[in-house]
Amino acid sequence: MFVQQGEDGIVHALLGPAEIKTTLRKRNAVEIRCATNYPFGNLLEYDIKARHGFRFSIRVPTWALYDSSGIEINGGKAHHLKPDNATGLHEVIVPAGKTKIEIWFGANVR
C-alpha cells in the first residue's frame, strides 16, 4: 500500500485501509494509519506521527474531479487537490509530531 520515495518520502500508492511503521533518513521514525472504505467510499483519514518532518504523497485517481476533491490538515482550511501531472501524486510536507489529514475525492455518479 505504501512505498518509499527517495530517502525522505512516503507515498500511499495503492489506496485502501493501511498502516506503516518505518524509519526514513536521519532516524526519522514515522507511523501512518489510513482509515477508509475506499474504493466503496471516497474519504481517506490519516493519523500520522513523525519524529521529523517528511514528504507524504497520495495517489489521486484519474477519475477524481479536482473541483470537488480536497484535503484538510489538522482541521484547518480545506484546499483542492493538485496532483502532479506526470505522477498523479498530491504531495504534502508533514511536520514533526502528530498530524491528521483528511482527503476526499469528488466523482460523477455512474
Image (tube, helix red, strand yellow):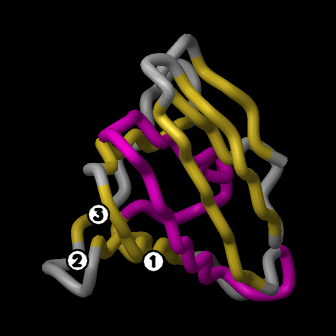
**Residue plotted at (43% across, 19% down):** 26
Q: In which quadrant of the rendered view does residue 66 lie?
A: bottom left
Q: Which residue occupies the extreme top position in the image? A: 6
Residue 28: numbered disc: none
Which amino acid lies under the numbered mark 2 shown in the image of this protein?
Answer: Ala
In this view, 52 is above or below 37 = above
Is residue 30 in view from this perspective?
yes
Give the quadrant of the C terminus. Answer: bottom right
Which amino acid lies under the numbered mark 3 shown in the image of this protein?
Answer: His
Q: In which quadrant of the rendered view does residue 45 lie?
A: bottom right
Residue 65: x %, y % from top left? 50, 65
Q: Is residue 41 magenta?
A: yes
Q: Are marks 2 and 1 in contact (CB under 8 Å)?
A: no
Q: Which residues are magenta?
A: 39-66
* Mark 2 or 1: the one toward you: 1
The residue wearing badge 2 is 78
Residue 70: x %, y % from top left? 37, 70
Is residue 105 in view from this perspective?
no
The residue wearing badge 3 is 80
Does residue 59 appear left or right of residue 93 in this picture?
A: right
In this view, 33 is above or below 40 = above
- 94 and 43: which one is in front? 94
Q: CA distance from mark 3 to mark 1?
A: 12 Å
**Residue plotted at (34% across, 45% down):** 92
Q: Is residue 97 magenta?
A: no
Does residue 108 appear left or right of residue 75 in this picture?
A: right
Judging from the image, what secondary structure is the residue with disc 3 in? Answer: strand
Question: Mark 2: few, some, or many residues within 10 Å (few <14, many ≥20)?
Answer: few
- 90 and 49: which one is in front? 49
Q: CA distance from mark 2 to mark 1?
A: 9 Å
- 99 and 92: which one is in front? 99
The residue wearing badge 1 is 102
